[in-house]
């Protein structure tokens, strides 16, 4: 069941959509904001609230890169692996993640602090390689810039 806070947030968004089903992505974002990720139980809760099947909601949840169907760390780092970032050295940044944090794409540090995920494009090609931490894009990455960023994140 959706929590009272989740239901209130969903109800506040409802007038902005032509039908309950159209609220699916926003409802998933609300649940993820409150729970950290979208479990099978949360997916069923959203489906029930919107009059959809769990399969329909899952097909939406698994399509979008910024919706997480598995637990993630406190800081989700989306490293762009597009052609531009690849040409400009995102493989070296990936290697640095492995060396510094012991994680590769799809993994979370044992302390639950960081999760590293690939993302097809951040639209920051002129500053490649780039990553997104939270809602902020960091470009022209080098191992040194990455170290500073990781140290700044709680």
Image: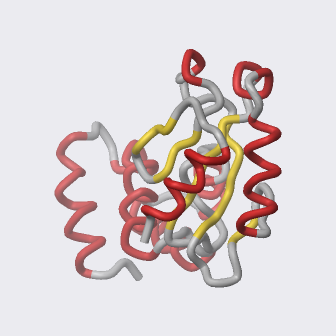
Foreground residue among 107 and 61: 107
Q: Residue furthest top?
A: 126
Q: Quadrant of the N terminus?
A: bottom left
Is residue 59 shown above or below 90?
below
Foreground residue among 85 and 60: 85
Residue at 44% from the left image edge and 51% from the top image edge: 24
Residue 119 vs residue 154: left or right? right
Residue at 46% from the left image edge and 38% from the top image edge: 137
Q: How is the image coloured?
A: secondary structure
* Quarter residue 71 falls in: bottom right
Residue at 50% from the left image edge and 71% from the top image edge: 74
The location of residue 129, given as percent across then percent down, is: 65, 31
Q: Quadrant of the C terminus?
A: bottom left
Residue at 60% from the left image edge and 37% from the top image edge: 141
The location of residue 122, given as percent across then percent down, is: 56, 30
The location of residue 56, given as percent across then percent down, is: 61, 53
Foreground residue among 115 and 48: 115
The location of residue 50, given as percent across then percent down, is: 41, 59
Residue 140 vs residue 102: left or right? left
Is residue 116 shown above or below 88?
below
- Numbered marks: total: 0
* Quarter residue 5 falls in: bottom left
């Amino acid at each position: 069941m959706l929590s009272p806070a989740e239901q209130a947030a969903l109800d506040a968004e409802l007038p902005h959509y032509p039908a309950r089903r159209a609220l699916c992505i926003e409802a998933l974002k609300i649940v993820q904001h409150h729970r950290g990720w979208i479990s099978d139980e949360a997916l069923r809760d959203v489906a029930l609230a919107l009059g959809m099947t769990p399969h329909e909601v899952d097909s939406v949840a698994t399509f979008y890169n910024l919706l997480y169907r598995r637990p993630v760390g406190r800081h989700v780092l989306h490293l762009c692996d597009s052609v531009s970032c690849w040409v400009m050295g995102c493989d070296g940044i990936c290697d640095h993640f492995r060396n510094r944090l012991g994680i590769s794409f799809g993994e979370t540090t044992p302390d639950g602090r960081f999760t590293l995920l690939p993302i097809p494009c951040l639209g920051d090609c002129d500053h490649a390689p780039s990553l997104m931490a939270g809602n902020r894009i960091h470009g022209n990455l080098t191992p040194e810039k990455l170290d500073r960023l990781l140290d700044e994140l709680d």
